[in-house]
Image (tube, rainbow, N blue to C red):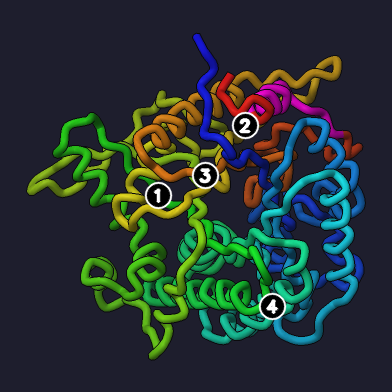
């Protein structure tokens, strides 16, 4: 069997996010984020874990980048911590925060690693939440200033920008069911309005890059698109899954790529639809250079009555990771890019996150044998290659995650890293999957 090659100049990388790895939660002027506050709520995070130290990346980033380099990583998707840069969300800029990220970019440059920078990865300053957070339109004004500050500060060093990470998670799961920070339970109308305010922030992120990013700057949005998989390849079931893709993702992708709330959106949301002001959609739908997709799982769909999508529940023994939501369904990396392209037209796509989370044992004799993760990623990448072969314009893939880190409400028990981290000693140990992925990147082929 020959290695399965990917297109020339395919971008291979790894992803991490500031709140999950940096630690130093209250160091050098950084203020509390909503996750710092949420983690201190009894019962909110497994084992009472918090973000205070995490992977101590704040003090160890240079050695982490040296390890990336040894493993052949050339592209790194990271995020900036809003409360480290503008502690109260909208007021004075914290120079120590800017200086920290300049040191980070210095180190990345020394190690020959290209940064892909996410402006916001869930760590809203608690000061903004205290003023209403994503419920209020003022959050977009605060983000507009934050985006201007960071692009002006780092635009000479960063050419690949991502505005927001996974709107669904910090709106629906943060304000709808209370699963994630800030742990609120609001009405459906309020939740839909949080989506709208997030979309305004995305628009301001695009605007800031256009105004201040300089020559060669690119910008896109990362969305954790929900991916229905047709039960089989009959045209009827494929059509049902395609329809389900649009309906499941209509709160984010339709306004960004169609420039309005469509009739389908109005039908789905009814009286709870978000309220827009004149000019909003011109900002929200400003053209992007690429689209990021975070894809881990999905569900099977078949055509029901009148062709309507009918979701099939997973049986008890269906394969899954150790996160309750992580059903292992490799076909999502085929159908996600395909359905996106069919719905919104061909544009450069990047898989900005994909990986597998498990509760794993410590390394034995210096070896972490995570064959389960290796096989999971390998099977998904086979489907991604098939999607590319069938015309999906996927230009790159970023594996989540480089290090084991703070996995939100699952704390430190769930591990997604290809590098094991001992959170007591901060010792890093590359897993079997890290060495395998290193070879995939080196050969630009699935081995």
- Vertically, is 183 above or below 126? above
How far apart marks 3 and 4 lie (CA) works out to 29 Å
Tell me residue 274's x, y (percent). 37, 78
How far apart marks 2 and 3 lie (CA) works out to 28 Å
How far apart marks 1 and 2 lie (CA) works out to 21 Å
Nearer the camera: disc 2 or disc 3: 3
How far apart marks 1 and 4 lie (CA) works out to 29 Å
Taking the spot 87% from the left edge, 56% from the top edge, the residue there is 106
Q: Which residue is mark 4?
A: 146
Disc 4 residue crowd, few under 14, some 14–19, many 20+, Cα 10 Å: many
Tell me residue 347's x, y (percent). 42, 54
- As drawn, the label of residue 395 is 3
**Sooner in the amino-acid sequence: mark 1 or mark 4:** 4
Secondary structure, mark 2, is loop
Q: Is residue 249 left or right of residue 380?
A: left
**Sooner in the amino-acid sequence: mark 3 or mark 4:** 4
Nearer the camera: disc 4 or disc 2: 4
Q: Are marks 1 and 2 in contact (CB under 8 Å)?
A: no
**Sooner in the amino-acid sequence: mark 1 or mark 2:** 1
Tell me residue 59's x, y (percent). 91, 52
- Vertically, is 188 above or below 244? below
Secondary structure, mark 1, is loop
Q: Which residue is mark 2?
A: 358
Bounds of the magenta span?
Answer: 428-440
Disc 3 residue crowd, few under 14, some 14–19, many 20+, Cα 10 Å: some
């Amino acid at each position: 069997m020959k290695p399965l090659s990917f297109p020339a100049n395919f971008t291979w990388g790894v992803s991490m996010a500031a709140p999950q790895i940096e630690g130093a939660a209250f160091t050098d002027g950084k203020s509390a984020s909503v996750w710092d506050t949420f983690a201190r709520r009894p019962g909110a995070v497994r084992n009472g874990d918090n973000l205070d130290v995490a992977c101590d990346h704040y003090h160890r980033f240079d050695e982490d980048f040296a390890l990336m380099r040894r493993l052949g990583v050339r592209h790194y998707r990271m995020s900036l911590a809003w409360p480290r840069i503008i502690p109260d969300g909208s007021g004075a800029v914290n120079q120590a925060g800017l200086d920290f990220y300049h040191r980070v970019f210095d180190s990345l440059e020394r190690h020959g690693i290209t940064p892909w920078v996410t402006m916001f990865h869930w760590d809203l300053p608690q000061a903004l939440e205290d003023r209403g957070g994503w419920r209020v339109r003022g959050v977009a004004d605060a983000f507009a200033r934050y985006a201007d500050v960071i692009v002006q500060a780092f635009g000479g060093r960063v050419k690949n920008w991502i505005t927001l990470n996974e709107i669904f998670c910090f709106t629906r799961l943060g304000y709808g069911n209370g699963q994630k920070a800030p742990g609120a339970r609001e009405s459906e109308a309020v939740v839909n309005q949080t989506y709208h305010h997030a979309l305004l922030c995305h628009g301001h992120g695009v605007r800031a890059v256009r105004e201040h990013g300089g020559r060669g700057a690119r910008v896109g949005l990362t969305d954790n698109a929900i991916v229905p998989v047709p039960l089989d390849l009959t045209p009827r079931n494929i059509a049902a899954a395609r329809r389900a893709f649009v309906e499941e993702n209509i709160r984010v992708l339709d306004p960004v790529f169609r420039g309005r709330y469509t009739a389908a959106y109005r039908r789905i949301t009814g009286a709870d639809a978000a309220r827009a002001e004149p000019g909003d959609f011109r900002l929200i739908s400003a053209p992007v250079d690429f689209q990021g997709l975070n894809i881990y799982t999905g569900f099977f769909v078949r055509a029901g009555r009148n062709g309507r999508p009918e979701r099939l529940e997973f049986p008890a023994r269906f394969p899954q990771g150790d996160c309750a939501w992580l059903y292992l369904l490799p076909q999502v990396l085929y159908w996600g890019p395909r359905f996106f392209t069919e719905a919104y037209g061909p544009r450069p796509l990047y898989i900005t996150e994909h990986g597998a989370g498990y509760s794993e044992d410590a390394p034995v004799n210096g070896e972490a044998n995570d064959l389960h993760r290796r096989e999971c990623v390998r099977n998904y990448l086979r489907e991604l290659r098939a999607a590319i072969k069938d015309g999906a314009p996927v230009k790159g893939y970023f594996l989540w995650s480089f290090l084991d880190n703070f996995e939100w409400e699952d704390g430190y028990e769930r591990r997604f890293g290809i590098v094991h981290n001992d959170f007591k000693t901060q010792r890093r140990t590359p897993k079997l999957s890290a060495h395998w992925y290193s070879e995939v990147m080196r050969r630009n082929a699935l081995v």
